[in-house]
Amino acid sequence: MKVAVIPGDGIGPEVVSAAMRVVEAASRRFGVPLEVKYAEAGDAALRRYGKAMPDEAWRIIDAADAVLKGPIGESAYEVTSGIRMKYVLYANIRPAKNLPGVPAIKQIDCVFVRENVEDVYIGAEYRVGDTAIALKVITGEGTRRVARVARKYAEARKRKITVVTKSNVLRVVDKFFRDVAFEELKGLEVEEMYVDAAAMELVRNPLRFDVVLTTNQYGDILTDLAAQVAGSLGLAPSANIGDSKAMFEPVHGAAFDIAGRGIANPIATILSAAMMFEWAGRADAASAIRRAVEETLAKGIATPDIGGKAKTEEVGKAVAELVERL
Ligand code: ATP
């Protein structure tokens, strides 16, 4: 597997370095050949080269199968959305699940499948005098392809899909998303829920959700909420999947407030790397990484955001060592 690694900004280089230790351990242990190339992108690249996505970064990603990316600071839109849009990474997969020893708001075990390249994030915004306009664009094909990804997850988990919309108010666009998704998901147990109710239910009774299929902006907001319900933003991984390329990254941002202190939680990035192995067809390496994370946390080796005393590096080292032994 050819992997382009973008360390990113803020805590990015710290969490990515810890995760790469685990990636290399999994590659050795499970015999997954890796060709790793580092690419500079983000705020630091902008200062150095005048571009948040320098041409060299695009060249490295073009040649890669997968991208493992740390969080990006101010230039997140250019880098993260830029990569999602250019390679049409149309499905954003964000699992929310409790981990051992991590204080959580509630028990939760669901997977969000968020449409990733449409909606109000296409950048069609306009100022006309005293008025500002943003276009919300939903296409049939965009909805069908992301619904097919949700179907795969639902079939593997054998439960139901909740389609989250606001179709009672957005009676054309959100209703279209709902109708196309329901059509594509025929044969499965499917329900619709409005986004405001979904926010409430995620706090009140999160276990009622299994697979959640939703549009780009609602997914953006609800997945931060779900991550916090599970314990910490520092634990939440994600995958951006397209037809030929994919990018794996933590849900959290650059967290400049704690950058450079070696205390950032690397688990979100490590679990994102597990999703990368799974995408590459190496479920053995993926599940070893997940088990190693669970065992590490169960032993109390954890960063301060989840009540531990360990440094970022120590968590990465502990997980990597377990992966080699599993
Ligand atoms: P963005 O807008 O890019 O999402 P943000 O500053 O709003 O960025 P985050 O950077 O995701 O939000 O983080 C919010 C807070 O959560 C941070 O200030 C930090 O204290 C905490 N946090 C986020 N990620 C981690 C992590 N990996 N480890 C520890 N704490 C974290």
Image (cartoon, helix red, strand yellow):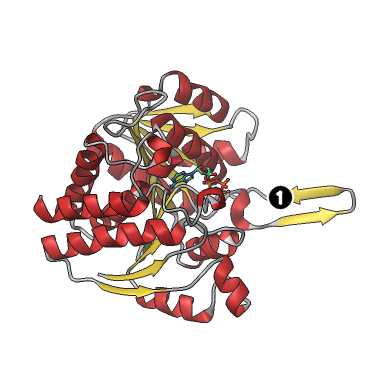
* Residue 241 visible here: no
Residue in the image at 53% along x and 50% along y: 255
* Residue 259 visible here: yes
Q: Nearer the viewer, residue 237 or 151?
A: 237
Q: Position of residue 121 (x, y in %)?
A: 60, 52
Residue in the image at 60% along x and 41% along y: 173
* Residue 69 image-quadrant placement: bottom left
Q: In this rendering, would 293 be left or right of 205?
A: left
* Residue 3 image-quadrant placement: bottom left
Q: Where is residue 51 in the image (x, y as percent from the top left)?
A: 60, 75
Q: Dot 1 lies on which element?
A: strand
* Residue 128 image-quadrant placement: bottom right
The vertical placement of 305 against 202, above or below, is below
Q: Which residue lies furthest to the left in this view?
A: 325
Query: Which residue type does callout 1 highlight?
Result: Ala
Residue in the image at 19% along x and 43% along y: 291
Total marks shown come to 1
The vertical placement of 71 against 3, above or below, is above
Q: Which residue lies furthest to the top in this view?
A: 204
**Residue density around tag 1, few if under 14, some if 14–19, many if 20 or more, within 10 Å:** some
Image quarter of the N terminus:
bottom left
Residue in the image at 45% along x and 45% along y: 114
Residue marked by disc 1: 134
Q: In this rendering, would 104 be left or right of 179?
A: left
Disc 1 within 8 angstroms of ligand 1 (CB): no
Q: Position of residue 42 (x, y in %)?
A: 54, 66
Q: Where is residue 181 in the image (x, y as percent from the top left)?
A: 44, 40
The vertical placement of 193 against 221, above or below, is above
